[in-house]
Structures are given as structure tokens and as C-alpha cells.
Amino acid sequence: MLQKTHSLAGLLAAESVVLYFNEPLISWESAALLMIGCLAGPLADIDKPGSTIARIFFPVSALLRFLKIRHRTLTHSLICILGLYFLLLPLPQTYLWASLLAYASHTLLDLFNEQGVALLWPLRMKFRLIPKFLAVKTGSVTERLIQIFLLVSIVLLPIIIR
């Protein structure tokens, strides 16, 4: 999936947290949470050389490359999501959940991709939620439809919930 798709999914995850915790949508707090969602959504692609997020966080990306961590392995795994949870535990609940759910949305979306995800890394087994022949190809029309669905959801969710 493209960074745009992951950013939209992260934004939707963060918006869900804002609504769940009854934060006013128009506030500095909500703006910060939504920005975190936009950044945390594509963050798992820090292991992909050349990605925008890898260029932004170059030192971490370079370290992962040095350690020979391949794309869709460690940063897309359940162990990474669990580690991130414990790392973020001292934060206020809204920041913890917005960050964690936005980050986890990346792995969830990539489970629909034809390459699959090493959820149980360091085991090499890759997982997909749908058969390979139905999988979403990066940049395809199907991915574009997913982007539209996410965007519509972002707009409608506050209207439906409140």
C-alpha cells in the first residue's frame, strides 16, 4: 500500500480515539492526535529504503538496514506492536491509543497486500487475510477505492458518532 493509504488509515484510527475519548474535534489536543495518526500510520515502512518515512527518520532506517531487517518483517510484526505499546505506556491514554492504533492500522492494511506480512517475526511465515489472487496490488484501482473509502469514513465518522 502507498503512504497516502497508510496516512489515511492512521488518521481514521486517531480520529476514532478522539471520538471514543469524547475529545472536542476542534482543539489543539485533537489536532495533535490527528497529526500523530497521519505520521504513525505509515511509520512501519521505515524499514523500506527510499520510502518517505525512511528518509524522514533516516538514522533509524539506516540502523534497520545495517541490521539487515527486511521490509514487512520486524516493523510489521505483532512483537513490534506489543513493544510499541509498552514503550508508549507512560503517555496519556489518548496519545497511547492514537499512536498504537494508527501504527497497527499499517499492518492490518498490508495483510490485504499480495506480499503478506511476517506477523510472527522472527518466524519467516507470511500472512495475508485474503487469497493472493484477490490481494490488493500497491497503487492499483482497488487501493484507490480503499483510499476513497477511508477518506469518506474520516468525514462521516464524526457526523455519525456525535
Image: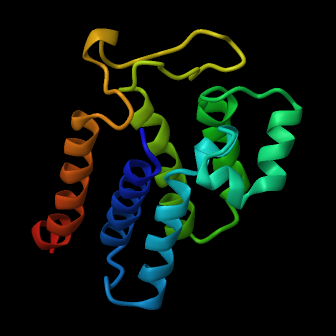
Left or right: 24 with respect to 62? left
Give the number of marks: 0
**Quarter of the figure with the C terminus:** bottom left
| Location of residue 46 in the rendering, given as x and y in whole percent from the top left corner | 66, 45
Name the side, left or right, on which 64 lies relative to 89: right
Question: Viewer-proximal residue, 24 or 113?
Answer: 113
- In percent of the image, x 19 and y 71: which residue is there? 158
Residue 39 lies, with reference to residue 122, above or below; the image says below
Residue 51 located left or right of residue 150: right
Question: Looking at the rendering, in which quadrant would you find the N terminus?
Answer: top left
Residue 3 in the image, given as x and y percentages of width and height: 47, 50
Q: Reply above or below: 63 against 40.
A: above
Identify the residue at image location x=32%, y=85%: 24
Q: Which residue is drawn at 10% across and 67% down?
A: 160
The picture quadrant where one finds residue 152 is: bottom left
Residue 2 vs residue 39, the one in the foreground: 2
Residue 129, percent across and down? Answer: 35, 19
What residue is at 60 percent from the left and 54 percent from the top?
52
Judging from the image, the colouring scheme is: rainbow
Q: Position of residue 116 (x, y in %)?
A: 47, 20
Name the outermost residue toward the left. Answer: 160
